[in-house]
C-alpha cells in the first residue's frame, strides 16, 4: 500500500471531466473505469435520476466509491454493510473499491457511483473547476498524511527537516508542500521524486519520505528492519478534512433524505468499527482486497485510535463526521495564501453542514 492519499486528489482536468460528465451509466468507458479494480458494482441510479427513498419497505440501492484498495481506513463503511446498519436505514449499499487508475470524481459525475470518498482540498478545487459536487460529511478529523524519517539523525520535529532531502509525490506540490514551505521554510531544492517505492528513502538515512500513517511506517519497519519516526502533518497545522463523503449537488437538492440516511448509517458504522468488534467489517475488507492481512488491519486501527484520526476535535462532541465553517475557512485561507487556491474562490460551495454535527450520543443510540 505504498501510496499517499494526496496523490489521488491533485486537481481535475476539465477536458476529462467534460468527457466523463456527459457519459451515462451504460457507457462502456465509465464501465471500464468502474470495473478496472473489481467486478462491476451493483447497478446504481443514473446521474439524471438520483436514487429515490424506499417505498413499501424496499431498500434503496446505493454505490459508494472508495479512493483506494480496501483497508482499515475504510473500515466503518464496510462495518455498516457487514452488520446491517445500512439496511436498518433502508439502504442496499455496494462499496466499489478504488485504486490508482480510478478517478472517483469522473465516476460520480457520470452517475456510476452515488457517493465518493473524497478529500477537502480536492472539493475546493472542484468548486474552482465548476464541478457540482459537495462534501456532506468527513469521517477523518485528521488527514493521515505523514513524513517519515530515520531514527538517530538529529530530527525530533518537522522543523529539523529543513535542508534535508524529502521524497514527495508530484501531487504534494499542490497540497501539503506549499504549507510546509510557508510554515517551516522548506525549499524546492529539498524535493526528491517519490514513486511509492521506499527503496531510495531506505538507502539515504538523512532523507525523509511522505507516507500514510497507517501503512507506510509499517511497510518500512518490515522492509528496513527499524522503526521510523513519524510526523503527522495534521498535528503540525495541516488541517484538510479527509476520507469524506461527497455526492452530486443535485442529490442534496432533490433527495436530502437519502443523503441523510447514508451519512447517519456511515457514521454509526464507524462507531461500531472503532468502539465495537471490527471483525465483520474486516472480513469484508479482506474479501475485497485479499492482499490486506490481519496485521496490517490491526496496525491501521491502532494508529487511527492512537492519533485520533476519526474521533477527535469537533467529532468528540458533535459526532464522527463533523465539520465546521471555521475549519474550512482556516484551511482555505492558509492554502490560498500560498497560491494553491484562488483567493476569490467561494470555498463554502464545497461543503454543507446540514447532515452532520448532531452530537455523538445521537449516533450511538
Image (tube, rainbow, N blue to C red):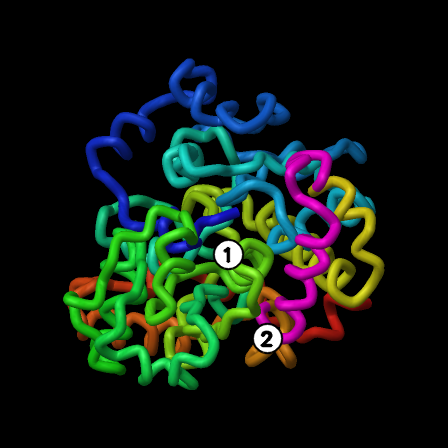
Magenta stretch: dominant secondary structure: helix
Query: Is residue 176 shown above or below 266?
Result: below
Q: Which residues are magenta?
A: 286-309
Q: Which residue is mark 1?
A: 244
Place of residue 224 in the rendered image (x, y in percent of width and height, measured from the top left)? 52, 59
Place of residue 295 in the rendered image (x, y in percent of width and height, measured from the top left)? 72, 54
The verdict on residue 241 being magenta is no
Residue positioned 66% across, 43% down in the render: 292
Residue positioned 58% across, 65% down in the render: 321
Task: Specify whether 86 is left or right of 209.
Answer: right
Place of residue 86 in the rendered image (x, y in percent of width and height, measured from the top left)? 74, 45
Say which quarter of the image contains residue 311: bottom right
**SS of the residue under disc 1:** strand
The verdict on residue 297 being magenta is yes
Q: Which residue is mark 2?
A: 307
How many other residues sit within 10 Å of disc 1, few (<14), some (14-19) or many (≥20)? many
Amino acid at each position: 500500500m505504498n501510496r499517499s492519499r494526496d496523490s489521488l486528489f491533485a486537481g481535475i482536468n476539465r477536458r476529462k471531466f467534460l468527457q466523463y460528465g456527459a457519459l451515462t451509466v451504460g457507457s462502456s468507458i465509465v464501465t471500464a473505469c468502474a470495473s478496472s479494480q473489481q467486478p462491476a458494482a451493483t447497478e446504481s441510479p443514473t446521474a439524471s435520476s438520483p436514487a429515490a427513498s424506499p417505498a413499501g419497505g424496499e431498500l434503496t440501492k446505493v454505490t459508494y466509491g472508495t479512493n483506494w484498495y480496501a483497508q482499515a481506513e475504510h473500515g466503518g463503511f464496510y462495518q455498516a454493510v457487514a452488520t446491517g446498519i445500512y439496511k436498518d436505514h433502508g439502504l442496499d449499499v455496494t462499496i466499489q473499491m478504488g485504486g490508482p487508475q480510478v478517478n472517483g470524481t469522473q465516476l460520480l459525475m457520470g452517475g456510476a457511483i452515488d457517493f465518493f470518498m473524497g478529500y477537502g482540498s480536492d472539493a475546493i478545487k472542484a468548486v474552482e473547476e465548476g464541478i457540482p459536487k459537495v462534501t456532506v460529511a468527513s469521517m477523518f478529523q485528521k488527514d493521515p498524511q505523514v513524513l517519515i524519517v530515520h531514527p538517530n539523525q538529529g530530527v525530533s520535529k518537522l522543523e529539523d527537516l529543513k535542508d534535508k532531502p524529502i521524497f514527495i509525490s508530484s501531487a504534494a506540490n499542490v497540497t501539503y508542500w506549499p504549507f510546509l514551505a510557508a510554515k517551516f521554510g522548506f525549499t524546492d531544492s529539498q524535493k526528491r521524486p517519490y514513486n511509492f517505492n521506499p527503496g531510495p528513502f531506505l538507502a539515504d538515512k538523512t532523507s525523509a519520505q511522505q507516507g500514510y500513517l497507517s501503512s507506510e511506517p509499517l511497510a518500512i519497519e518490515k522492509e528496513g528492519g527499524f522503526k521510523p519516526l513519524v510526523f503527522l502533518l495534521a498535528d503540525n497545522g495541516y488541517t484538510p478534512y479527509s476520507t469524506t463523503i461527497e455526492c452530486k449537488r443535485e442529490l442534496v437538492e432533490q433527495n436530502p433524505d437519502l443523503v441523510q440516511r447514508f451519512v447517519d448509517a456511515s457514521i454509526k458504522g464507524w462507531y461500531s468499527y472503532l468502539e465495537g468488534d471490527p471483525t465483520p467489517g474486516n472480513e469484508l475488507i479482506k474479501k475485497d482486497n485479499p492482499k490486506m492481512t490481519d496485521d496490517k488491519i490491526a496496525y491501521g486501527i491502532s494508529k487511527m485510535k492512537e492519533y485520533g484520526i476519526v474521533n477527535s476535535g469537533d467529532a468528540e462532541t458533535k459526532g464522527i463526521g463533523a465539520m465546521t465553517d471555521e475549519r474550512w475557512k482556516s484551511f482555505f485561507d492558509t492554502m490560498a495564501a500560498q497560491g494553491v487556491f484562488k483567493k476569490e474562490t467561494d470555498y463554502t460551495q464545497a461543503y454543507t453542514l446540514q447532515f452532520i454535527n448532531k452530537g455523538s450520543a445521537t449516533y450511538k443510540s
